[in-house]
Image (tube, rainbow, N blue to C red):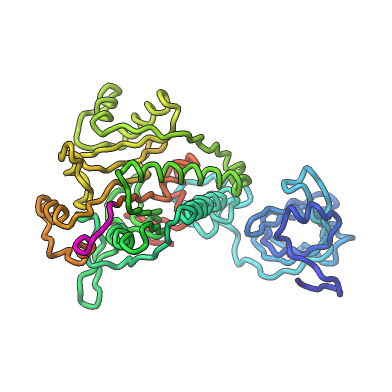
Amino acid sequence: MQSIDGVSLKRVLDVEGIKKNPDELVIIEACVHKIRTMSEFAFVILRTGRYIVQAIYEKDRCKASIEQLKVGAYVRVKGHIREDERANLGFELQLEDLEILSMPAADYPLNVGHKKLGCGLEANLDNRSVALRNPYERAIFKVQEGVVSGFREFMESQGFTQVHTPKIVAAGAEGGANIFKLDYFNQDAFLAQSPQFYKQTCVAFFDRVFEIAPVYRAEKHNTSRHLNEYIGLDFEMGYIDSMYDVMEMETAMIKYVMNYLESHCKEYLDLLEVKLPIIKDIPSITFVEALDLIKGRGGKNKYDLEPEDEVLLCEYAKEHWNSEFLFITHFPASKRPFYAMNDKEDSRFALSFDLLFRGLEITTGGQRIHDYQQQVDKMKEMGIDPEELSHYLSIHKYGMPPHGGLGIGLERFVMKLLDLQNVRQASMFPRDVHRLEP
C-alpha cells in the first residue's frame, strides 16, 4: 500500500477486483507502451508485467504534464477507474497525476507497440530484450509458464517428487559426439545431455520423480527444430508393468496441461489466436507399422524416422484418428540408448517410444533395464565398457524396480502448441550453433 495526499491506494494487480470497484482511486507502476495524442486529450497505453492498461490524459484533470513523456519511460501514475467496455480490460484509467521513474536513453529499435513486431527472426533475437516487451512475444512465455506449471502440478498430484540433478557430469547419458566437453579442475567433464542416470537413481528411493531443467546437446544442426540448450520436462516412474504405463501417464499429463492452460492462460491463448488440441486417447503404432505407412505416402523405408516422415505420420493420425498426437513404439534396439530394455519377443526392437505432435517429435521415452547382468550384457553388446559407468551400474547392482520414463522438449512442445515456425521463438534467449548472445 502507498499513500498519496493522505489517501491509501492499491497498486493494480487484481484486474477482476478493480472491475468490481468503479471510480476507485489506484496507483499503477508500468512502462509507457504507446502514446496517441488527440486534439484535446491523449491515450497513454501502459504496460505492466501482465496487462495493457489504457489511460486517459487530460491537461486540466492531471497535475503533471506529459510533454516530456515518451514510449519506454517507466512511470507511477494515479487515477480513477472508469468503466469502458471498449477498452481491452473493460475499464480505463482517468489520470490525475504521474511521476516519471526512469527515461530511456534511446528509442526502441523494434515496433513494440504494434500487435506483432513485424520483423524477421534474426532482428527479433538480436534485440531480444526489446522484442519481449511486445505483448504478443511475451504471451508465448506466459503460455510456456503455464505448460510448466501444469506439468509440475500434475506430477505432484500423481505422487512424483521433484528433483534437481547435476548438469556437470562425468559421462554422457546418451553417448555419442553430441556432448559439450569442459575442463573441470583439470578433469574432463561434460554438460548433461539428459538427467537420465540420476532420475533412474532417484527411482530407487522416491519411486517416482520429475525434473524441469536445462539439457545440452552439442549438435551442429542449424534447423528450425534444434537448440543446443533447451528445457527438458523429465519424469521417471517405478513399478511399471510395461512402457505403456509411461505412455498412459504422459497422455494423462498432456490432458491435464491442456485443461490448465484453458483455465489459467486463456487471455494469452486468445492473444496468440491459439486453438488447443482436443485429446481423448493418443493412438499408437509400431516403428515397423510406421515405415509401412510412410512408404505408401512418399516416405522411404529406412531404419529411423526423418523429419518429413514425422509430418506424414501426423497427417495420417489426423486423417484416420482425428488426433494431433501419435505414439511410435518399438524402435530398432541399435538406434536407442544402452539403457533401453529390449523386447523379449523380438530383441531387434527396444521397448522405447517417441511421441509426435503436429509433425514433430517432442518426446522420447520407454522402459529401462533394471536387471544388473542384463544391463552389463547390453553395454558390452553396444561396445561400452561397463567399468566406465560403474557409478551408474551401482543402482542396478543394489537393486531396482521395473521402471521407465521420458523426456519432453519444452520449447518444441510450445512451438507446436502455438504453431510457431521456429523453435527459437519458444526460447527466451536461444542458444544454437551460431548464437551465444544476448
Q: Tell whether 332 sits left or right of 148.
A: left
Q: What's the residue at 15%, 39% (across, down)?
A: 348
Closer to the camera in the image, 247 or 268:
247
| Whether residue 312 is situated above or below residue 119 in the rendered picture | above
Closer to the camera in the image, 242 or 314:
242
The quadrant the N terminus occupies is bottom right
Q: What's the residue at 11%, 53% (across, down)?
A: 377
How far across and down, in percent of the image, does residue 155 sit? 45, 54
Q: Quadrant of residue 351?
A: top left
Stretch of the chain drawn in magenta: 396-402
Q: Quadrant of residue 433?
A: bottom left
The quadrant the C terminus occupies is bottom left
Q: Is residue 357 magenta?
A: no
Q: What's the residue at 74%, 55% (across, down)?
A: 44
Q: Tell whether 202 sits left or right of 22.
A: left
Q: Tell whether 8 sits left or right of 276.
A: right
Closer to the camera in the image, 153 or 364:
153
Q: Tell whether 154 sits left or right of 405.
A: right
Residue 124 in view of the camera:
no
Residue 429 in view of the camera:
yes
Q: Which residue ends up furthest to the bottom in the rendered image?
A: 185
How far across and down, in percent of the image, does residue 273 sit? 58, 39
Give the tally of numbered discs.
0
How far across and down, in percent of the image, does residue 139 sit? 57, 50
User: Dominant secondary structure of the magenta stretch?
Assistant: loop
Q: Which residue ends up furthest to the top in the rendered image?
A: 296
How far across and down, in percent of the image, does residue 391 sit? 20, 67
